[in-house]
Image: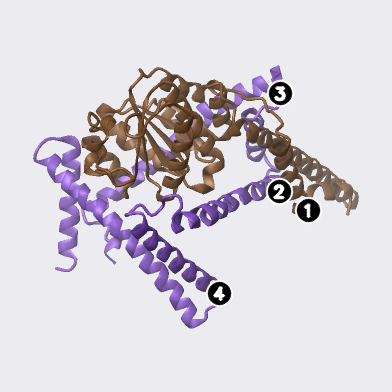
Amino acid sequence: MSIWERLSKIDRRIIYLLLALVIIIPIVFRIPSTVAVSESAQMAYDVLDGLPAGTPVLFSTDFDPASMPELRPMMTAVLRHAFKKKLKVIMMGHWPTGIPLSTIILEEVAQEFDVEYGVDYINIGYRPGAGLVMIQMGREIRSVFDIDITGEPLDSFPMMKPIHNYSDIGLVACFEAGDMGEIWARYAWGRFGVRIIMGTTAVVTPDIYPYLGSRQIEGLIGGMAGAAAYEKLIEHPDKAMIRMSSQAWAHILIVLFIVIGNIGFFMMRRIERIKKKRTE
Amino acid sequence: MRRQIPLLLTFLTGVAIIIAFFIPHRPFNEVQDILIDWAIIITGFALLLGVHSLLRKHITHIQRKDSGWGFSLILTFFFIGVFVAGIISAFQYKGYSLTPGSSLYFVYDYMVIPLSATMFALLAFFIASAAYRAFRARRLNATLLLVAAVIVMLGRVPIAENAFFKFLTRFSDWFMFIPQMAAKRGIWIGIALGAFAMSLRIILGIERTYLQ
């Protein structure tokens, strides 16, 4: 096998090994990375930052543990921003396996601030129905969420007494690993005009751009890069900024492999053409 | 009659929802509210139907000893295990079975989280290997895709703060906002028109495959 052939047919185990190394080394040695703040992440930050203190913000957890590495740091950063701005947080979700995660994230972040459950934040959990739940919440939240996750009636919490539907909520911040974000834009914005910012996994991000372009949503935090950008914006570097280093080097490695593969491919093609000409 | 009644119900429900969308006032909005409540209840029961289908399929696999029946056995065993853990936790913690400390939370924390995260993390390795093999500049279309992918990949994660990476970041943003979004819009409009046509066909009783 010639060197060019070898370059175009590198064993996948070598790729796996090198990729594992470039992912693990920056995390273990905490190698810092450069974070570029995208326009869409800046827009999300500006919307939340512009809300007056005391405004209720609805957080929707529409992801499960598979997307946790990207969306957990993102939700943590946005929650920190919300509590820092003294906004009221209502946590809910459309993915049942995401509710324990959002509960952990909410309680972890709440401990960093001087906030009280039921007064400054609440967790109302999950109901099946997705778009239907969103439509009913536009009329009366209690028609679908009459109790919080501990089973207490919503009206027993001071912060929930004046909140009945989207017109009492300043912003919806939803975190998406699937197509629930589009449903939020179609039903909550489309029918009730609620303001939305979205945090999405990198895979989902391209699907959401049309909604950002038409201003149906007002900000988009895309993937780990978006999470790291948000951490930079709130001046609280955390897990996303560390993980970004791994992601950056992994991208460089993949690009390098693509270049090597193409060099091998072109050289092989050239050799084949020369051989063909000689035989002719 | 077995076909006419479901078709009539579909037609009336579809028309009622359309009218309520354009005239969101009494009595149409009330009809819509009732229908939505019913739909939410049916969605809950659909989960039960899903569980029934899943178990029936895998128990049949085990009984017939079809190829891969061992996997069906593992699935059924863990399904029953998690179900029992959920029931016990629900009794222990007054309905909220995923309270930290409960047996269901143990399953979630030590099995669901690591297994889901592992499955998703493995994708990175497959994507890297697939990108290396698939991104070959064979033709003009493939070359354009390759160049765009490389620019977006590097622009999203700059490793240094210099003019080159700043340019890549800006270009990547532009690329996502303009050409990518234009293509997505085209696809979405196509899908929406298709969904609209299909909905009309169902409401008007032309499309009847859902009855089979």
Q: Are marks 3 and 1 on the same chain?
A: no
B114 relative to A125 in the view: left or right: right
Label 4–label 1 contact, CB within 8 A: no
Q: Nearer the viewer, mark 2 or mark 3?
A: 3
Q: Position of residue A1 (x, y in %)?
A: 88, 54
| Discs 1, 2 touching: Cβ within 8 Å | no
Residue under label 2, please give it.
B133
- Residue under the point 32% across and 50% down: A128
In which quadrant of the rendered view does residue B104 lie? bottom left
Image colour assigned to chain A: brown
Which residue is found at the position 50% from the left and 36% from the top?
A: A205
Chain B on-screen colour: purple
SS category of the residue bearing label 1: loop
Q: Considering only order in the chain, which callout, 4 or 3, is on the residue closer to the N terminus?
A: 4
Expressed as whole percent of the image width and height from the top left, the position of residue A121 reads 36, 32
Q: Is residue A247 left or right of residue B104?
A: right
Please tell me which residue lies in front, B147 or A91: A91
**CA–CA distance between discs 4 and 2?**
34 Å
Q: Earlier in the sequence, mark 4 or mark 2?
A: 4
Horizontal side of residue B9 vs A102, given as left or right:
left
Q: Nearer the viewer, mark 1 or mark 2?
A: 1
The residue that mark 1 highlights is: A11
Q: Which residue is mark 4?
A: B70
Q: CA distance from mark 2 to mark 3?
A: 28 Å
How many labels were placed on the picture?
Answer: 4
What crowding class fits label 4: few (fewer than 14 Cα within 10 Å), some (14-19), or many (20 or more)? Answer: some
For the residue marked with disc 1, what is the amino acid?
Answer: Asp
Q: Amino acid at mark 3?
A: Ala
Q: Dot 2: within a 10 Å radius of its alpha carbon, few (fewer than 14), some, or many (20 or more) residues?
A: some
Instruction: Select label 3 or label 1 by which is in front.
Output: 3
- The chain holding disc 3 is B
Chain of the residue on which disc 1 is drawn: A
